[in-house]
């Protein structure tokens, strides 16, 4: 009748959560996500790098319960575009989420269903509140793994559809050695 409480030790240096479900996303799993399709194809053929890994402790999809997960987002670029997570809305659209940055450097792109975007820079210690209804994607703008913890309702679910098709209205690129958040020319 009562679930058993649990404590796990998250390794803040590697992002690993012992006993968690592990998901690995390689560049080949992200076809159509990056602007520069030629660079994407070349890099997939050359080494098909791991873009990110997720360690998730998930509960049954029930209202009131919570999941948590670490993500290790590796450094890299496809053309000018920094490596990022796929990004998603929640299937239950009014579910919020909290992220805590643990290591490395990056940021979060958020977007309303109407395409209004925000960029929140993240470094170790940054806590980001993702309000209900906002799609969210994290981006590694540094040269070491960007590691963060996310806490989200167990019944939130992941809706990848629209982001997979259209992306975000902004992209995060490196130009003349600078990190720039610019309009997505394909939007
Ligand atoms: C965070 C959480 C997870 C999510 C993961 C990777 O850890 O938001 O729910 O799965 O990031 O992001 P995505 O699912 O967009 O690939
Ligand atoms: Zn989410």
Image (cartoon, grey):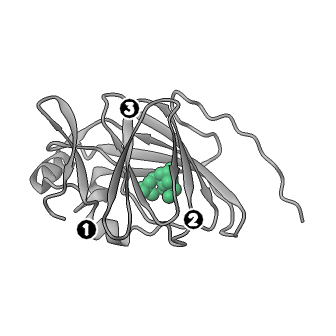
Please identify the quadrant where the N terminus is shown. Answer: bottom right
Judge: label 1 CB < 8 Å from ligand 1.
no
* Foreground residue among 164 and 18: 164
Q: Is residue 39 left or right of residue 27?
A: left
Mark 2: give few (<14), some (14-19) or many (20+) Cα within 10 Å: some
**Mark 1 sits on what residue?**
166
Please identify the quadrant where the C terminus is shown. Answer: bottom left
Q: Which structural element holds mark 3?
A: loop
> What residue sits 27% from the left and 55% below the top?
28
Query: What numbered label is drawn on residue 95?
Result: 2
Q: Is residue 180 left or right of residue 119?
A: left
Q: Position of residue 12 (x, y in %)?
A: 56, 30
> What residue sits 38% from the left and 32% below the top?
105
Judge: label 2 CB < 8 Å from ligand 2.
yes
> What residue sits 16% from the left and 55% below the top?
35
**Mark 3 sits on what residue?**
105
- In three-dimensional space, the C-alpha distance between marks 3 and 2, rounded to whole angstroms, equals 26 Å
- In three-dimensional space, the C-alpha distance between marks 2 and 1, rounded to whole angstroms, equals 22 Å
Q: Quadrant of residue 46?
A: top left
Q: Is residue 130 left or right of residue 161?
A: right
Q: Quadrant of residue 142?
A: top left
Mark 3: give few (<14), some (14-19) or many (20+) Cα within 10 Å: many
- Compare marks 2 and 1 and give the one earlier in the sequence: 2
Mark 1: give few (<14), some (14-19) or many (20+) Cα within 10 Å: few
């Amino acid at each position: 009748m009562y679930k058993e409480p649990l404590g796990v030790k998250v390794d803040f240096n590697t992002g690993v959560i012992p006993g968690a479900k592990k998901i690995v996303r390689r560049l080949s799993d992200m076809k159509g996500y990056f602007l520069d399709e030629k660079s994407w194809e070349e890099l997939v053929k050359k080494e098909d790098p791991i873009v990110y890994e997720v360690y998730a402790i998930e509960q049954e999809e029930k209202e009131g319960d919570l999941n948590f997960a670490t993500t290790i987002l590796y450094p890299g670029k496809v053309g000018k575009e920094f490596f990022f997570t796929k990004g998603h809305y929640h299937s239950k659209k009014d579910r919020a989420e909290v992220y805590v940055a643990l290591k490395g450097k990056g940021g979060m792109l958020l977007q309303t269903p109407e395409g209004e975007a925000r960029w929140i820079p993240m470094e170790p210690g940054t806590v980001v509140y993702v309000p209900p209804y906002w799609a969210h994607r994290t981006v590694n703008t540094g040269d070491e793994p960007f590691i963060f913890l996310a806490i989200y309702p167990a019944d939130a679910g992941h809706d990848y559809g629209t982001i997979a098709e259209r992306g975000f209205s902004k992209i995060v690129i490196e130009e003349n050695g600078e990190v720039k958040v610019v309009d997505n020319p394909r939007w």
